Amino acid sequence: MDKTASSPSQAVADIPSGATLAVGGFGLCGIPSTLISALLDQGASNLAVVSNNCGVDDWGLGLLLAAGRIAKMTSSYVGENKEFARQYLAGELEVELLPQGTLAESLRAGGMGIPAYYTPAGVGTLIADGKETRVIDGREYLLEPAITADFALVRAAKGDRHGNLVFHASARNFNPVVAMAGRVTLAEVEELVEPGALDPDEIHLPGVFVQRVVAVPADQRAKRIEKRTVTVTENGTA
């Protein structure tokens, strides 16, 4: 089955206002920036977004946030976005914080059809408020629900027309579990190849988890650097 969309705008065309989105990436590494930009142009609003973080003020999910299109964020880290802090403190944005491992496992559980699981992470903290606990072998655990989403947005280095994906190094991060958790998963790929071009042992995520694939336009393949650190020499040059 050929799952390719003709353009990013076509890929996101049916995402409605009020949808739940799971979005891959860690910081600005491996984020589906092309699909996010297409969704910004598409106009969907009141979105509930599950992602490790919310981009930065002028890139990634930060663009949707600045446009007032995100109603709720479920994340594990939110420290790089001043607009995020402003909206939260002003009561404009609902926020759910989860330990990073819990976020990853909840997405994986959702993709595997596991409704909930027990974890020691968060016991005795605000994370545990209102959640069921259980003592197993003398240790207390929280019951955490799985996370699923109406749509998932991910980015891969390579993908074929059947939706099989290959990620590059640390850009894999949350992308596989995000893709698994989406009822409809959209993958933007830097290189689109024909079926059979990928070695089966090379594939990180099988196409069964992906419903749409779109090639990233050549002029959108450049990657943003979230923080640049340089060493200053004795003569003052970097």
Image (cartoon, rainbow, N blue to C red):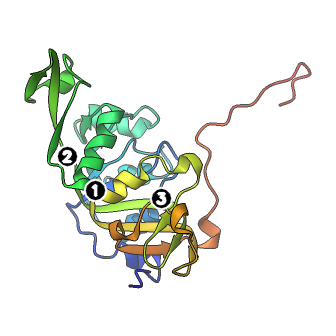
The front one of 13 and 143 is 143
Q: Give the label on residue 137, or none.
A: none
The x and y percentages for residue 160 are 51, 75
Callout 3 crowding tier (Cα within 10 Å): few <14, some 14–19, many ≥20: some
Task: Residue type at mark 3: give it.
Answer: His
Circle 2 Cα neighbour tier, 10 Å, few/some/many (<14 / 14–19 / ≥20) = many
Q: Earlier in the sequence, mark 1 or mark 3?
A: 1
**Cα distance, mark 2 to mark 3?**
22 Å
Do tag 1 and tag 3 residues touch (Cβ < 8 Å)?
Answer: no
Q: Is residue 132 above or below residue 225?
A: above
Q: Quadrant of the N terminus?
A: bottom left
Query: In what element is the residue under mark 3?
Result: loop
- Residue 204 is tagged as 3
CA distance separating discs 1 and 3: 15 Å
Query: Which residue position is annotated with label 1?
Result: 181
Q: Earlier in the sequence, mark 2 or mark 3?
A: 2
Query: For the point 47% across and 58% down, which residue is it?
Result: 204
For badge 2, the amino acid type reads Ala
Q: Secondary structure at mark 2?
A: loop
Is residue 117 left or right of 160 when viewed as pictured?
A: left
Q: Residue at x 36, y 72 (%)?
A: 12
Residue situated in front as seen by the camera: 209 or 47: 209
Residue tagged 2: 146
**Residues at badges 1 and 2 in contact (C-beta under 8 Å)?**
yes
